[in-house]
Amino acid sequence: MYKKIMVPTDGSKKSELAVQQGIQLAGVLKAVVVVLHVIPEIPTLVTPYPDQPGGFLSGLSEELDRSGEEILEKAKDKYADSGVDFQTKLLRGSAAHEICNEAKKGQYDLIVMASRGMGEIQGYLMGSVSNRVVRRAGCSVLIIR
């Protein structure tokens, strides 16, 4: 059935619940789990000089990198003894786009991810990563509420 499961996470409580349930599902199915975090791209105005336009974005980029690594390390530490074949992956770009590309490229059978928790109207107007992934992914998607 499902042999390779991707669980995208942003470090939020809802996405932590999705990781937990993805790990549990993988344990039952004897599947591989890859916990994925996508770091948003920073505009090309970044310079190494904080006093020039765009320089402050360099610090933001470094902070996003550190945060992404911390999110994945936290998941590794929490589920190291789960008995599940567990990996992590860090990508950069637009979250929905990168999740769908990775799902195709990595031949995943299932994506387990958290919903954003918006109401129907707000979700329709603003969109969400989970909504875009559900519409575009080439594999099954399980949304955790």
Image: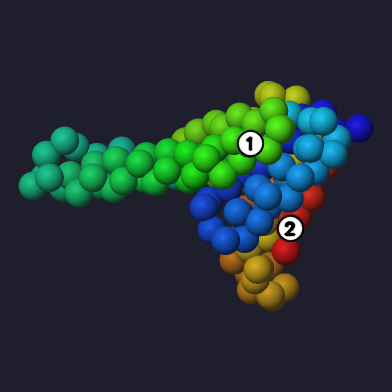
- What residue is rendered at 73% in x and 29% in y? 32
Q: Earlier in the sequence, mark 2 or mark 1?
A: 1
Say what secondary structure mark 2 lies in. strand
What residue did someone put label 2 on?
144
Q: Point out the image quarter for the C terminus.
A: bottom right
- What residue is rendered at 78% in x and 37% in y? 26
Amino acid type, label 1? Asp
Say what secondary structure mark 1 lies in. loop
- What residue is rendered at 69% in x and 75% in y? 119
Whether pointer 2 and pointer 1 mark residues with C-beta atoms closer than 8 Å, the reply is no
**Residue 7, image x and y in percent?**
66, 42
Q: Is residue 54 visible?
A: no
- How crowded is the residue under tag 2: few (<14 C-alpha within 10 Å), some, or many (20+)? some
User: Taking 53 as reference, is 90 above or below it?
Assistant: above
Q: Point out the image quarter for the N terminus.
A: top right
**Residue 13, image x and y in percent?**
57, 61
What residue did someone put label 1 on?
81
Left or right side of 88 for 144: right
